[in-house]
Amino acid sequence: MNLRGKIQFAELTDTGRVREHNEDAIGSNADIGLMVLADGMGGYNAGEVASGIAVQIVTELASEAAKREDRADIDPQSGLMRQSIILRDAVYRANKIIFQTAQSQTHCEGMGTTIVACMFCDNKVAIAHVGDSRAYRLRAGQLEQITLDHSLLQELVDRGFYSAEEAQRSTNRNYVTRALGVEPTVEVEVHEHAVLPDDIYLLCSDGLPDMVEDEDIHLTIKTFNASLDVVSQQLVELANNQGGRDNVSVMMAQVMEPFAAKRNLLLKIAGWFR
């Protein structure tokens, strides 16, 4: 299923006002509704190597698998759609390659990257993430963060040491507890969400929420949502105007109409007798 025209996309990445180079990376495939965003870290220029590998591998593997497999099929073991498994396995593969590169290349030692990726199919979106790059959804005027950071601060919130409001004001927001390339294997968090027309999805590196509070992200999307390109530009500009202490990347998708997967007649008939 080609999703062009059913979902609108926009993306933007910026070095910010303090960093000398951009260690964020973004990639997409509008035909299959794929967006991938990674925020690299570690070593001189090594962060951008890690994030670049992550985006390239996930984009290529997910795109290739989408050509071969029915992404709407349900995986019998996990109960997830095949597209969720495709996304998860691509992130696993990226972790392995980044780890091997870090071990074999001296200048890449200690590198890693966070990642958040999503893929749309059959009126659902699969979201995979590792680290503190985030996904948000704006639905019916309400903005919701739909990923939970893999960070020390989030663990403290979960345990009741901080409220969500206190966490937003904390200066210790960047200690991630999970990242690609740090260990031979990594736990990839994957969730599926039902999609409705007019939903707006935002993927971002931590350079946005570290500089801009969720209320201001919400207001910016509501104010400029006639154009996702303008929203992206405004969000990046807002982060930079607040100090731009980190690279900032945003990727956006707005659902224009339903995109149910086509199923053959035999499968439909089988479903009637379940």
Image: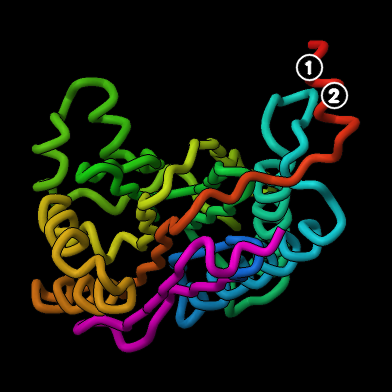
Residue drawn at point x = 69 percent, y = 45 percent: 261
Q: Amino acid at mark 1?
A: Trp
Question: Residue 137 or 208: which is nearer the viewer?
Answer: 137
Q: Amino acid at mark 2?
A: Ile
Q: Residue 272 bears which disc, if any?
A: 1
Is 198 placed above or below 12 here? above
Residue where numbered disc 2 is placed: 269
> Hey, which residue is sitting farthest top in the picture?
274
Q: Residue at x 65, y 72 (%)?
A: 56
For residue 254, which quarter of the picture? bottom left
Determine whether label 1 and label 2 are within 8 Å by CB: yes
| Span of residues in magenta | 1-28
Question: Which of 28/172 is in front?
Answer: 28
Find residue 116 and report its horizontal and vertical position in percent: 49, 55
Q: Does 130 sit left or right of 237 as displayed?
A: right
Question: Residue 81 lies in what quarter of the image?
Answer: top right
Whether residue 112 appears in this view of the structure is no
Counting from the top left corner in percent of width and height, residue 64 is at 80, 64
Q: Does the image show residue 179?
A: yes
Query: Left of 163 or right of it: where is 260?
Result: right
Q: Is residue 124 magenta?
A: no
Q: Tell me the CA gap for discs 1 and 2.
A: 5 Å
